[in-house]
Image: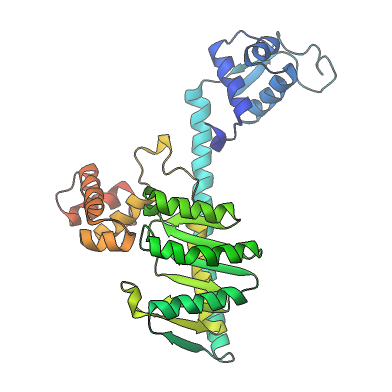
Amino acid sequence: MLEALGLDTGTEAVYRAMLAEPGDGAADIARRLGTTKEAVYRAWERLAELSLVQSPAADGGPSGPSGPSGSGRPAGRPEPVSPALGLDHLVTRAQTELEEHRRRVAAARVTAARLASEYAELSARTTPVTVEHLPDVAQTRAKLAVLTDRVREEVMVFAPGGAQTEANRQAARPLNERLLCRGVAMRTVYLDSVRNDPATVAHARELTGLGGQVRTVATLPMRMTLVDREAAVIPVDGDDSSAGAVVLTGQGPLTALCSLFEMVWETARPLGDPARRADDADRLDRQEAAALRLLAEGHTDEGIAKRMGLSHRTARRIATLLMERLGARSRFEAGVRAVQRGWLPSDL
């Protein structure tokens, strides 16, 4: 359970054993855990690296400065550091590293967006952009089938709208199977809300079972299918699929759309990841954070539901719970309190 802090399962078990019986030596710990003394020594070394043990006492460990086999390990048994001190230090370090990673990702996004914009302007002057209109769902699906037959390397998909309908799943299944069986790389981003729909989750797991990659995010900007980074299929009306779609080609728009996909993919969560860790009780999960931002921007429950692929009742429940957690009587007050708590940026 402490892998995020640098402790593998075996090292954590040794640390727990030392805390439970501080007087035990390596042989005692190995016997209790059903492992070897060498494994205990390795765990001690890792614990020392993490500052979770103090300098060894003079008993219970390898004899002499290099141990019984000349392993180079220190003699004696180390003393465990209190979790209140040692683990707090590791948690603080992990949080610092996470913040630094977030800053690097944010800087990379800005650079990627600037580069994409510059490249799009350059390409637009030299590469013709074409737009093909597909007037209805049937022709859109037929065009996707044609593109699927021609794809050589990669397909990237934004699939908003929450739980996928049976008709959508049935239409997509044979296309996906053909792609993945040919060795084409396929990445799909759904909304986090699909995790609550068993049929959609089963469909997503079919994709991963065939070699596809599936992640989820709280909100998506549009429905989109990118084929070989050369063509993009985008609906004319994001709220009405019957209005048909357009197929865009040309380096300029495709470079920008591919950059958008990569930025969303970077922040998306793999389908198998847990929604929230036990020590995150006072933090927002991704769905709550997205709902809070929409709430503070003045969206109604119906608007939040549509943007996040949720039912109206679920969106209202999330909004109500957020306002209760913030002790707010209005949505404006909820936004102010969220900024004060650090849940929203101050420049929102």
Q: Is residue 236 above or below residue 156?
A: below
Tell me where residue 304 appears, x and y as whole percent. Answer: 27, 60
Q: Is residue 2 above or below residue 307?
A: above
Query: Viewer-proximal residue, 311 or 22?
Result: 311
Tell me where residue 298 appears, x and y as whole percent. Answer: 22, 63
* Residue occupying the far right of the picture: 70
Q: Quadrant of residue 125?
A: bottom right
Q: Is residue 109 visible?
A: no
Residue occupying image coordinates x 54% and y 56%: 207
Query: Viewer-proximal residue, 178 or 253?
Result: 178
Colouring style = rainbow
Query: Viewer-proximal residue, 117 or 104?
Result: 117
Q: Quadrant of the C terminus?
A: bottom left
Residue occupying image coordinates x 28% and y 63%: 306
Drawn side of residue 152 relative to residue 250, left or right: right
Residue occupying image coordinates x 69% and y 18%: 35
Q: Is residue 214 above or below residue 220?
A: above
Residue occupying image coordinates x 49% and y 50%: 271
Q: Quadrant of residue 302?
A: bottom left
Tell me where residue 200 appears, x and y as whole percent. Answer: 42, 54
Drawn side of residue 136 relative to residue 324, left or right: right
* Residue occupying the far left of the picture: 329
Q: Is residue 42 above or below residue 320?
A: above
Drawn side of residue 213 relative to residue 237, left or right: right
Q: Is residue 44 visible?
A: yes
Tell me where residue 114 appears, x and y as whole percent. Answer: 52, 74
